Image (cartoon, helix red, strand yellow):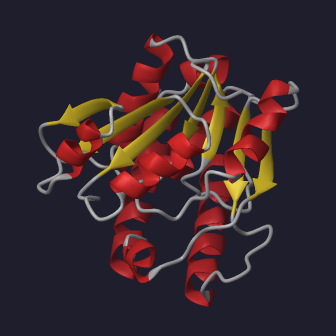
Amino acid sequence: MKDKRLAIVIPAYNEERTIIEVIRGLKQHGFVTLIVVDDGSSDRTAELARQEGVILLRHIINRGLGGALGTGIVAALRLGAEAIVTFDADGQHDPDDIDRLIEPLVKGEADVVIGSRMLEPTGMPYARRLANWSANIVTYLLFRGWTTDSQSGLRAFSGRAAAQLQIMTNGMEVSSEIIAETVKNRLKRKEVPVQAVYTDYSLSKGQSFKVGLRTLKKLILAKVRRLAL
């Protein structure tokens, strides 16, 4: 599926160093509908993306990863996408993994597919593995959804599944919230192994310990809100 039925959503915040390479890499692999959500960048991210001829959406202010994903997914659904892939703008994802990601959707084996870096964690720094497992445990304890890589930015959704997602968080806690939504809506979830491309730049974009604590606080608040609904 490399036609207009598949939309790739690329949240981007101050990614002028990598955005062109990411867009061109996806185009070279035959992907047609690319939606870049510039999340209030202060650099040339939007300008460079526009030059590449993608669908460009812009937030006036920086809302966060959750806000950008929400905007991109809604736009993809309005375009009539039958499948949606989320793809980070920092260059850590390999376009070759997308076919593996959407195959379970096409075969009807899953509604949501998580690209897990933890199934084959070759080259993954130990500190990142530890942080991911910690996030997986927290996600399970709060939302009863187990996955080996709850913080993966490489995911695929059927159009029907994406339409059921209610993204209420704005920050990086959205990754765990998506798992919570799959549990709430009883969506079939599957994992496939993917390989992250680690560079000093992509590693700098990950969660620090301080950011991780803030994310944990927001996840607990999200859990409280869900219980109140």
Q: Is residue 150 above or below residue 38?
A: below
Left-right relation of 122 to 71: right
Residue 128 visible, this orientation: yes
- Quadrant position of the N terminus in the picture: top right
Considering every residue shown, the one lying at the far bottom of the view is: 126
Residue 173 visible, this orientation: no
Horizontal and vertical percent position of residue 132: 60, 71
Q: Residue at x 65, y 16 (%)?
A: 160
Foreground residue, 226 or 155? 155
Q: Is residue 49 above or below residue 162?
A: below
Figure quadrant of residue 219: bottom left
Figure quadrant of residue 181: top right
Horizontal and vertical percent position of residue 103: 81, 36
Left-right relation of 85 to 24: right
Horizontal and vertical percent position of residue 69: 41, 38
Q: Residue at x 42, y 22 (%)?
A: 74
Foreground residue, 200 or 192? 200
Considering every residue shown, the one lying at the far front of the view is: 28
Left-right relation of 192 to 71: right
Left-right relation of 179 to 109: left
Horizontal and vertical percent position of residue 152: 59, 57
Figure quadrant of residue 203: bottom left
Q: Residue at x 29, y 31 (%)?
A: 56
